[in-house]
Amino acid sequence: MKKVLLVCLLLSVLFLLVAVVSADDMGKAQTVKGWVADAKCGVKGANDKPGTVACTKKCLDAGEKMVVVTDGDQKLLTVDNPDALKDHIAHHVAVTGHVKADSIHVDSVKML
């Protein structure tokens, strides 16, 4: 019985530590540099070539999700609040927001 109680206590402490670390990460805003694109084109749409803006707008109007293609590792971050970036389609930007897994909630944006 004491072993079961000890295991339960250890698991409780472990879960508490995980919860504290997770809550701390969620509160920090991160700045990510990259291109505003659509999920269909993704990395191919992460540039300033002629026609990119029109193509990206067309895909977004057709229902594709807005993404930020990060510089360097070319990771796609789905934008939770696409209205925050509606004036920056196909632009190279620095986005500050809360990143969770493969998505970002944009707090502010700056043109690069």
Image: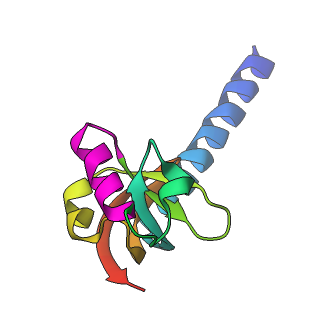
Q: Nearer the viewer, residue 6 or 76?
A: 76
Magenta stretch holds residue 87? no
Dominant secondary-structure state across the stretch colored magenta: helix
Q: Nearer the viewer, residue 87 or 110?
A: 87
Magenta stretch holds residue 55? yes
43 on left or right of 50: right
Query: Residue lying farthest front?
Result: 50
Residue lying at 22% horizontally and 63% vertically, measured from the top left: 86
Picture coordinates of residue 10 (x, y %)? 71, 35
4 on left or right of 99: right
Task: Tell me, yes or no, if residue 107 can be seen here.
Answer: yes
Picture coordinates of residue 19 (x, y %)? 53, 46
Query: Residue lying farthest right?
Result: 3
Figure quadrant of the N terminus: top right
Q: Nearer the viewer, residue 14 or 30?
A: 30
Picture coordinates of residue 51 (x, y %)? 37, 63
42 on left or right of 13: left
Whether residue 58 is situated above or below residue 74 in the rendered picture: above
Task: Tell me, yes or no, if residue 23 can be seen here.
Answer: no
Figure quadrant of the C terminus: bottom left
Picture coordinates of residue 26 (x, y %)? 44, 58
Whether residue 96 is situated above or below residue 73 in the rendered picture: below
Whether residue 102 is situated above or below residue 21 in the rendered picture: above
Residue lying at 38% horizontally and 73% vertically, measured from the top left: 91
Query: Residue lying farthest top?
Result: 1
Q: Which residues are magenta?
A: 52-65
Q: Nearer the viewer, residue 87 or 33?
A: 87
Residue lying at 39% horizontally and 62% vertically, measured from the top left: 52
